[in-house]
Image: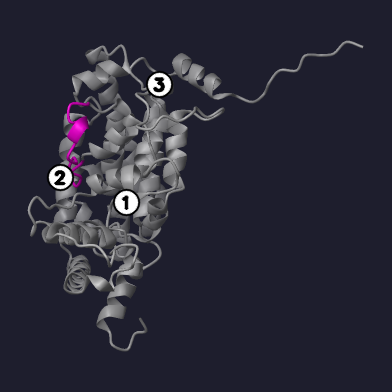
Amino acid sequence: MTKLKTERNMRSRQDIEELEFQNLAPYAMKSRESSGRQFTESQHPFRTCYQRDRDRVVHSEAFRKLEYKTQVFVVFEGDYYRTRLTHTLEVAQIGRTIGRALRLNEDLIEAIALAHDLGHPPFGHAGEEALDERMRRVEQGRFNHNMRSFEIVTRLERRYPDFDGLNLTKEVLIGILKHQTKYDVVGEAGKYFNEGPTIEAQVVDFADSLAYLNHDIDDGLQSGCITIKDLVESHLWQRACADVHGKVGDDLEMLRYQVVKQLIDMQIQDLLETTDQRLQDAHFSSSEDVKKSRATVVGFGERMAQEREALQELLNKKLYHHYRVVRMTSKAQRILHDLFDVYLKGPQQLPYSVYERNRKYSEKEIYQLICNHIASMTDRFALEEHKKLFNPYTKV
């Protein structure tokens, strides 16, 4: 009886890497061409290096905490609003959509996207401003959430016996450190100062910008802090409405869903067309060409960029400065300043894992460990800690 040879159904890592070379654009970052990790590890049999990076981020403690960290509306405002976690997932989804259309490495995009906000403290940008203000009181002290994200994945997460951090690839680390949008400042690059980001990292920057503009509109309308009347001032909103208004009639809730969806589609379409043309003009023949050029090729056309800017300014005026949002952010900052003060006066109140009792600290070291401790908190934990420390009737 003849023995039939069976074909292997399972793909190995080498098979996936070969598919990347066959299917991705010349300028895309191939897994096989990665600059590698700080600490040498053996390759995985069926996952590429960027797939492993993504999985390490997802399994990190810092990633889980994003569920209870503010985007715009603090967690006690309601269950509907985006948290830092749902925002992160939306960025990853939008980034993969863009990456697939441009024939980029979707796994690298996803790894950077899922890690880009790990360093956010409780209460969103209000929390970041509060911690930065406190750290400025010591020499060369600052708080930057990109740097914090970088420190989390390179030092603070401890899951492996042979090294601190997650030992991510260089491309993901640079994508985290050099993440830049209207609300994200590039971290101190140090040894990566002269390293240009990949196109995949640029995609995450714009996917982040695109996600928060549109979901802030959705959350703002849901909260009642902005109205459709407010948004009519925006040409971009008007264009999106024109495409969907006849389909939904007077159903305002459906109008909100459909217009936000249309806004995202319009912006992605514009970004893809603009970026594709720029890539053709740039004539990149490899991912190394992209890194060396350090030019931003991902982006919107002139009209879309202007209309997005106008809509962003409208949100800044109507939503972010709405009295309810201002009250939330002011309260959040007071809570973090209170916590910082009480820890500073009596660091013995900090957990043993944070403050070693038999060690002497400099003023800057005390500030830094308090800042790190507060930055690691979720909104919910910060509120509970504040209640324990400032309400005499709360059980410690």
In the image, is residue 29 above or below residue 335? above
Q: Quadrant of the C terminus?
A: bottom left
**Front-lying residue, 260 or 28:** 28
> Mark 1 or mark 2, which is nearer to you?
1
CB atoms of marks 3 and 2 within 8 Å: no
Q: Which residue is mark 2?
A: 310
Q: Position of residue 128 (x, y in %)?
A: 20, 56
Magenta stretch holds residue 182: yes
Q: Which residue is mark 3?
A: 30
Q: Label 1 neighbourhood size at 10 Å, few (<14), some (14-19), many (20+)?
A: many
Asked whether residue 245 is in view, the answer is no
Q: Secondary structure at mark 2?
A: helix
Pointer 3 or 1: first along the chain: 3
Q: Which residue is mark 1?
A: 215
> Mark 3 or mark 1, which is nearer to you?
3
Pointer 1 or 2: first along the chain: 1
**What scheme was used to colour the molecule?**
one colour
Magenta stretch holds residue 56: no
Q: Position of residue 56 (x, y in %)?
A: 44, 42
Q: Which residues are magenta?
A: 181-195
Q: Position of residue 84 (x, y in %)?
A: 34, 54
CB atoms of marks 3 and 1 within 8 Å: no
Report which quarter residue 337 is drawn in. Answer: bottom left
Three-letter code for the amino acid on which mark 3 is drawn: Lys
Three-letter code for the amino acid on which mark 1 is drawn: His
Kindly give the residue lying farthest to the front in the view shown: 358
Q: Residue at x 38, y 17 (%)?
A: 25
Q: Secondary structure at mark 3?
A: loop
Kindly give the residue lying farthest to the bottom in the view shown: 393
In the image, is residue 387 above or below residue 363? below
